[in-house]
């Protein structure tokens, strides 16, 4: 067996950090292990990787161990679910809106962990109860928040009610988290409306003097994972694959990408790719910093 390839790093100006990636710990949504995601990130020479599984830190130990072995900087966070009334099982399109939260250091990790724990205690398995006011009392500047994927509060409002609705949703996030802790996320999966949506989000960010940041919103490590992702979504929805037509992306686009590809894809949004690398460099830390410093205890 060959030893894992080690991460060598690139200058921030020419690199890219993936800030929105799911592993199979996003149950019935992501399809690859944290180690698979790490190894592909290293092969692509990404400057850092964020694992943001749904409503929990379930995969962070495997993620941290795999990344430490190859020297890949790690960013820790979660994609939180807001307003879901039932579990995603049996639904072609799960309920609720999403908010992507990245921890600023061990203090941010602890605060996010506490918020997730309270949300799960208030709800039930697979259906956390969480609102923006709950998060307002918790973050205290220790989180970097992204507006998220199509189910994020701002993109969802844009799709549902146009630019005025998106403005209201973004202003609410600014009120809760502050402009210094918020960035507008752009992604592109070859869908027909991707360019129009990204143009609208970038213009909206400019009106509020907020940065944009590019992600891949990755749910598998390489394009080969697309078929498994499709089957997994069908299992979650309790439908056969044919019945999922129209609910799922037609192309294998939700995978990790290199800095060069991201720079080409987001050339019309200057700074969005470089900003991802800058945020990754700012937020990366080793999970060992979170571990409590317990006294030695003799074990028979």
Image (cartoon, helix red, strand yellow):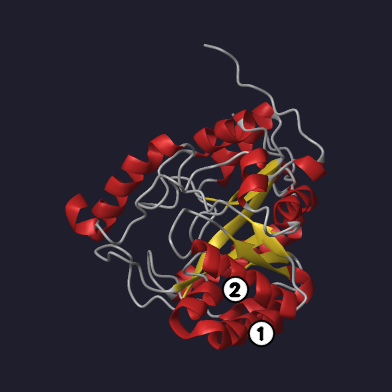
User: In percent of the image, x 71 and y 49: which residue is there?
Assistant: 292
Asked whether residue 284 is in view, the answer is: yes
From the top left corner, tell me how far across and down residue 204 is, in percent: 66, 77
From the top left corner, tell me how far across and down residue 121 is, in percent: 47, 71
Q: What is the count of numbered marks?
A: 2
User: In percent of the image, x 81 and y 44: which residue is there?
Assistant: 13
Query: Which of the two residues, 292 or 158, is positioned nearer the viewer here?
Result: 158
| Residue depth check, mark 1 versus mark 2: number of the one nearer the observer | 2
Mark closest to the chain's N terminus, 1 or 2: 1
Q: Secondary structure at mark 1?
A: helix
For the C terminus, the image quarter is top right
The residue beneath circle 2 is: 200
Q: Is residue 37 left or right of residue 241?
A: right
Q: Which numbered dot is residue 171?
A: 1
From the top left corner, tell me how far across and down residue 185 is, in percent: 62, 63
Q: Is residue 217 left or right of residue 185?
A: left
User: In percent of the image, x 53 and y 34: which residue is there?
Assistant: 35
């Amino acid at each position: 067996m060959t030893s894992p390839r080690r991460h060598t790093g690139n200058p921030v100006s020419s690199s890219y950090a993936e800030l929105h990636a799911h592993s199979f710990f996003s149950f019935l949504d992501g399809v690859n292990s944290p180690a698979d995601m790490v190894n592909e990130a290293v092969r692509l020479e990404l400057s850092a990787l964020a694992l943001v599984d749904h409503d929990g830190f379930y995969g962070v130990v495997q993620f941290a161990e795999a990344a430490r072995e190859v020297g890949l900087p790690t960013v820790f966070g979660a994609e939180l679910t807001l307003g879901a009334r039932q579990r995603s099982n049996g639904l072609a399109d799960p309920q609720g809106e999403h908010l992507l939260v990245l921890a600023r250091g061990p203090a941010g990790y602890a605060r996010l962990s506490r918020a997730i724990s309270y949300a799960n205690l208030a709800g039930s398995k697979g259906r956390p109860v969480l609102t923006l006011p709950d998060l307002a009392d918790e973050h205290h500047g220790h989180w970097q928040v992204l507006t998220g994927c199509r189910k994020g509060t701002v993109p969802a409002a844009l799709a549902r009610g146009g630019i005025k609705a998106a403005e209201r949703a973004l202003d609410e996030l600014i009120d809760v988290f502050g402009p210094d802790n918020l960035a507008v996320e752009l992604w592109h999966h070859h869908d027909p409306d991707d360019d129009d949506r990204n143009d609208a989000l970038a213009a909206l960010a400019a009106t509020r003097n907020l940065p944009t940041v590019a992600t891949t919103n990755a749910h598998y490590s390489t394009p080969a994972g697309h078929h498994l992702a499709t089957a997994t979504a069908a299992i979650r929805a309790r439908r056969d694959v044919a019945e999922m037509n129209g609910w799922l992306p037609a192309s294998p686009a939700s995978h990790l990408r290199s800095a060069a590809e991201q720079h080409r894809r987001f050339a019309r949004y200057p700074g969005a790719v470089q900003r991802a690398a800058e945020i990754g460099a700012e937020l990366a830390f080793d999970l060992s910093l979170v571990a409590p410093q317990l006294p030695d205890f003799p074990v028979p």
